[in-house]
Image (tube, rainbow, N blue to C red):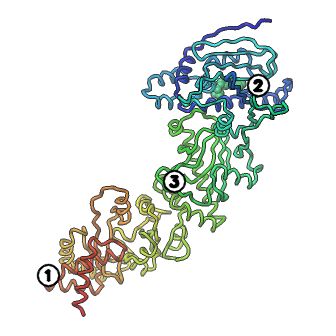
Amino acid sequence: MASQTETLEFQAETRQLLQLVIHSIYSNKDIFLRELISNASDALDKLRLESLTDSDLAVDTADLHITLEADREARTLTVRDNGIGMTRDEVVDLIGTIAKSGTASLLAKIKEAKDAEAAQSLIGQFGVGFYSAFMVADKVTLRTRRAGTEQGTAWESDGEGSYTVSEAEGLPVGTSVTLHLKPADGEDGMGDYLAGWKIRQIVKQYSDFIRWPIRMAAEAGEAGEDGTRPEPETLNSMKALWARPRSEVTEAEYHEFYQQISHDWQPPAQTIHMKAEGTFEYEALLFLPAHAPFDLFARDTKRGVQLYVKRVFIMDDCEALMPNYLRFVKGVVDAHDLSLNVSREILQHDRQITAVRRRLVKKVLGAVKDLRTKDAEGYAKLWEQFGRVLKEGLIEDRDNTDALLELVSADSTHDPEQPTTLRGYVERMKEGQDCIYYLTGENRAMVENSPHMEAVTAKGYEVLILTDPVDEVWTDQVPAFDGHRFQSIAKGQVDLGEEAEGSEEAKAEKAKREEDYAALLGWLGTTLAEQVKEVRLSSRLTTSAACLVGDANDLTPTLEKMYRAMGQELPPVKRILELNPTHPLVTALYEAHRAEPGAPALVEIAELVHGSALLAEGGDLPDPARFTRLLTDRLARTL
Ligand code: ADP
Ligand code: MG
């Protein structure tokens, strides 16, 4: 029987889409193979499912697989599967039209889009799938026979206005798609898709975890000396651990997989393996590494989570799935209901992806917490490696502030050997203490020896010692932990509760002293106006004569330094000089000023007091030579 060839027109919309695809919306042509393999894999899934549910279907499902065949002479690449196949009507329906709803309006938007990038981001909203073959082929022939039917169908098109459909005899069950490749001239990103290495590379990159074997038939010229053809080679590993139930995966397999994706030779600190079912299905396999990569703080560090769609690799560094402060988390998320062409822009705005991300973040923070409760030493290590990054979350991720605060581990005056949790701090808080006291600085020694510590530690209050640059920022933005305000002991007026305890007489005495000192403080304020914005009496000092403090909203000196180091222009940040009215130097200064207000010698003393306060907290003197000269002159006179 002569087969009937029928020529059919593509739907107008299909034609438009084809034009868009052919005229290279995609800079990456390699993805055509990913699309065809994904279709073949779906067809194999469908056949297996149907063979299980329809016992009348007489098909052999023992060796379901995908074969790639390159023919150099004919310049064709064929993707073949022994899957479900299609009937003639299905071919016309599925391949000849775009059944997806909303296509027309989407195409209209794409045409209106001003540039290629906007167009590409729009087109990512649905898969171009099969048509991507026309990016690399000027003719495509599809031959197929539906399982359970006898009649095969051939479909062919050059991707212009029309296609032909005819009957084909003697086809096995399944589908083969033959691409008549365009010339590979290296332009337009057109690779040599007949080369074994290129095919291997694309399969490895995009389709490694497809659950069916992807075999590459030996090329025609590769026959061995005795004339036998070599065995086909399986290109993909098929090992999608994330798709297997947790109970069936061994620890060693997790580690091996982690190594593969992270290139880290140490086993991970924590493994998270989850499966979400329901309206938006996905699997996630995430790892917390045991140690930080060298580039964790580089400006453009990549995030470690890869996105897959039904085992097809879509992208690395998927920022939509993991916030920046969890950039050290490595792993894979396989979402079932996304288009293979989904773009970063679309992911960023996808509500379901946002929900996935929220859930993943909770899982990761939960895993960190888990480690803390189960393995203190492991937790200490993790915190040492990633604590600084996790604390960025206190600034970035307001939804999880409480969970993050629970994880914080910080040095404290309580125990020089052991860092504390905030919970631990709160449990040790003294009667009547309502804030969590902390002091930031460049290192532990500097903070511990800072004059600001004096009265607080004399009172027996514990102070957190925060020395990471990020501490300067989050402490400004997170108001409280468990109802207790964070209070820098170098900022604002520190109220250590003496007012409450103090008698009426003590209060009166304090007021009187302030009145007495008003003249001196006023004069010092004018004399040191270049350096400080105010001079006042202090209640935070016991042994030092003076210290410098900031207002609640002022930049700390470390933060100011950081901003300047980053090249930010800032007006000089003036601080407040606080004097200890019980210190002999301060009382002597007071007497001297009363005897001879503003005497020239007093100006030098004022400078020395300010300079010493600056040095005591580890600050840099604006003019060290001058300070040293004033000091040595003074010393010489006392001898
Ligand atoms: P999608 O895969 O997103 O549905 P495609 O354009 O890739 O879109 O494919 C369109 C349809 O054509 C598929 O849904 C499937 O029904 C059919 N199809 C494509 N390739 C095959 C194949 N190898 N075997 C069986 N059906 C196929
Ligand atoms: Mg497809």
Q: Is residue 37 left or right of residue 61?
A: left
Secondary-structure class at tag 2: loop
- Which mark is in front, 1 or 2? 2
Q: Which mark is residue 599?
A: 1
**The N terminus - image quarter:** top right
Sequence order check, earlier mark of 2 and 3: 2
Crowd around label 1: few <14 · some 14–19 · many ≥20 (10 Å): few
Image-quarter location of ligand 2: top right
- Residue denoted by label 2: 84
Label 3 vs label 1: CA separation?
56 Å
Q: Is residue 635 left or right of residue 4?
A: left
Label 2 vs label 3: CA separation?
45 Å
Q: Amino acid at mark 3?
A: Tyr
Q: In the figure, residue 371 lies in which quadrant?
A: bottom right
Q: Amino acid at mark 1?
A: Ala
Secondary-structure class at tag 1: loop
Q: Is residue 286 above or below residue 141?
A: below
Nearer the observer, 98 or 176: 176
- Residue denoted by label 3: 325
Image position, residue 536 (x, y; %)? 26, 74
Q: Amino acid at mark 2?
A: Ile
Nearer the observer, 260 or 560: 260
Image position, residue 590 (x, y; %)? 21, 83
Can residue 335 be seen in the rendering of this structure? no
Image position, residue 286 (x, y; %)? 64, 50
Residue drawn where x is 57% and y is 18% of the image = 14
Image position, residue 460 (x, y; %)? 45, 79
